[in-house]
Image (cartoon, helix red, strand yellow):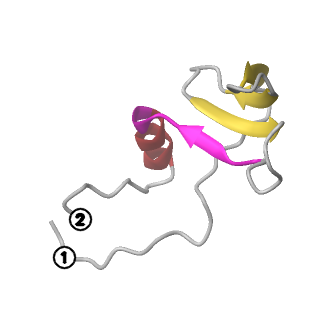
Amino acid sequence: MENKKLQLEEHNFRVDSIGWEQVIYYDRNHDKIVCLENRERDILEFVGGVPGEIIGQQLFTLSAGKREMEKVNKRIPTKEE
């Protein structure tokens, strides 16, 4: 493996969420959190009920992150890296 210096991305990695299903979750205080969920149900995007800086942020399972990053010729660094 090459000995490259790793760099963080300028912005968080995102995928297109057009057509995702809206789902509603409730936090421990019973406040509503509105999300979009992809068809595979392994990526969520926050769209309501969270602080403004969280709106639009996406959560990926590890396998979803690997899958989606591979599509754009990127990868998640290993623990050793």
Residue 72 picture location, percent across and down: 51, 52
Q: Which mark is residue 3?
A: 1
Is 75 displayed left or right of 8 in the figure?
left
Whether residue 58 appears in magenta in the rendering, the answer is yes
Q: Which residues are magenta?
A: 56-63
| For residue 75, above or below residue 45 | below
| For residue 14, above or below residue 38 | below
Q: Residue at x 79, y 48 (%)?
A: 55
- Badge 2 is on which residue? 81
Whether residue 57 appears in magenta in the rendering, the answer is yes
Residue at the farthest bottom position: 5
Residue 34 or 63: which is nearer the viewer? 34
In three-dimensional space, the C-alpha distance between marks 2 and 1, rounded to whole angstroms, equals 9 Å
Dot 1: what SS?
A: loop
Is 77 displayed left or right of 18 in the figure?
left
Q: Residue at x 60, y 59 (%)?
A: 12
The image quadrant of residue 34 is top right
Q: Amino acid at mark 1?
A: Asn
Q: Residue at x 54, y 27 (%)?
A: 42
| Quadrant in which the N terminus is drawn | bottom left
Residue 3 picture location, percent across and down: 19, 76
Residue 29 or 52: which is nearer the viewer? 29
Dot 2: what SS?
A: loop
Residue 78 or 15: which is nearer the viewer? 78
Q: Earlier in the sequence, mark 2 or mark 1?
A: 1
| Quadrant in which the C terminus is drawn | bottom left
| For residue 39, above or below residue 51 | above
Q: Residues at badges 2 and 1 in contact (C-beta under 8 Å)?
A: no
Residue 76 or 52: which is nearer the viewer? 52
Residue 53 picture location, percent across and down: 77, 57
